[in-house]
Image: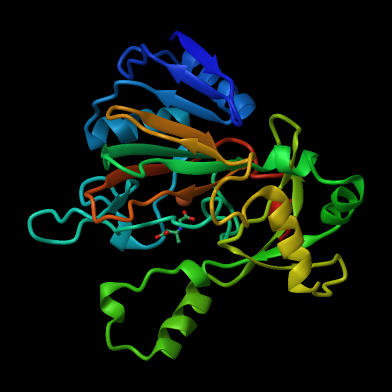
Amino acid sequence: MKYEITNGTINQVIVDDFDPEKVTDAELKKLKELIYKNKIAVLKNQFLTPEQYINLSKRLGTPEEYYQPMYHHPEVKEIFVSSNIPKNGEQFGVPKTGKFWHADYAFMPKPFAFTLIYPQVIPQQNRGTFFIDMGKAYNNLSDELKAKAESLICRHSVRRYFKIRPTDIYKPISEVLKEIEQETPEVQHSCVFTHPITQEKTLYISEGFSEGLIDKNGKSLDQGELDELLEATGQKDKAYKNPAIHLQTFEKGDILIWDNRSLVHCALHTSAPEPAESFRITLHDEFDFYEGVNDF
Ligand code: 7UC
Ligand code: FE
């Protein structure tokens, strides 16, 4: 496995000669270490069937199916399908997913270590995903804000970005809202945690899923306090010009793998109705998401 590291707002590990049939466990271990350290890897020229894709993923970690079946690939349930291209005349997966700053499953008690994205149909314009390194974001805070953030807990929920399901049509909105709260009740996570592998401190908040901050005594802080922290990370920049924002573009055959503990991301969906489709797999590794995650 030969790789090259390109320096940028976020470093990328580019692997040109990746062969999932030949790669050894030792090389995959090395790849994971490189991802923890650099945050993003791109495997070039991959043309895998859904089975080959899930088999490769299983060698990198433990896949978890998305909690809502409407996102599942019909043949491989662990594949989350983002698509605006119907298959056999029917909707395939869910269109326009993740178009807001978030870390995958931050609204769940046990978020994932890694996310893999394998674009299948790439639009000509506005392709790619924005990323912000929240380890760097923490590091760039003033000492005063660092100390404050470390003492806080953040509440997270999917409620603002829950997608209306086909089966929700004609339901009273109050019923849908009640179901969201029952199925995915708000969770709490430490506002800052130490990455279990790199030992880097990371600010764990996002514009899409974070609902508010509370102190260790359970007292809620003003919304302005969360907004101040989000602003400092670059997530409030609606023009995506903040220097902390990295735009990752794709080519056909790329598989992107990133560290979902350190990075928040925001999908860049085409404004014109261009066809787009990608297959996502999310993985747990052998470590807790962070030390103490089970206490929440
Ligand atoms: O449709 C979507 O944008 C999915 C989103 C609510 N959740 C992705 C995740 O894994 O956190
Ligand atoms: Fe996502």
Compared with residue 167, is residue 205 higher up or lower down, i.e. above or below?
Answer: above
- Name the residue furthest top: 2
Q: Quarter of the image for the C terminus: give it.
A: bottom right
Q: In this orientation, which residue lies closer to the viewer: 73 or 237?
A: 237
- Name the residue furthest left: 88
Question: In the rendered image, which quarter is residue 242 located in?
Answer: top right
- Residue shown at the point (72%, 37%) measured from the top left: 136
- Residue shown at the point (52%, 30%) measured from the top left: 40
Report x, y in % for residue 94. Answer: 30, 59
Question: In the rendered image, which quarter is residue 250 located in?
Answer: top left
- Residue shown at the point (37%, 91%) measured from the top left: 172
Left or right placement of residue 179 versus residue 141 in this view: left
Q: In this orientation, which residue lies closer to the viewer: 179 or 95?
A: 95
Q: Quarter of the image for the N terminus: give it.
A: top left
Q: Is residue 113 visible?
A: no
Ligand 1's image quarter is bottom left
Report x, y in % for residue 17. Answer: 36, 11
Report x, y in % for residue 108. Answer: 56, 60
Q: How is the image coloured?
A: rainbow
Left or right placement of residue 3 versus residue 133 in this view: left
Left or right placement of residue 145 versus residue 226 in this view: right
Q: Is residue 131 visible?
A: yes
- Residue shown at the point (71%, 39%) measured from the top left: 135
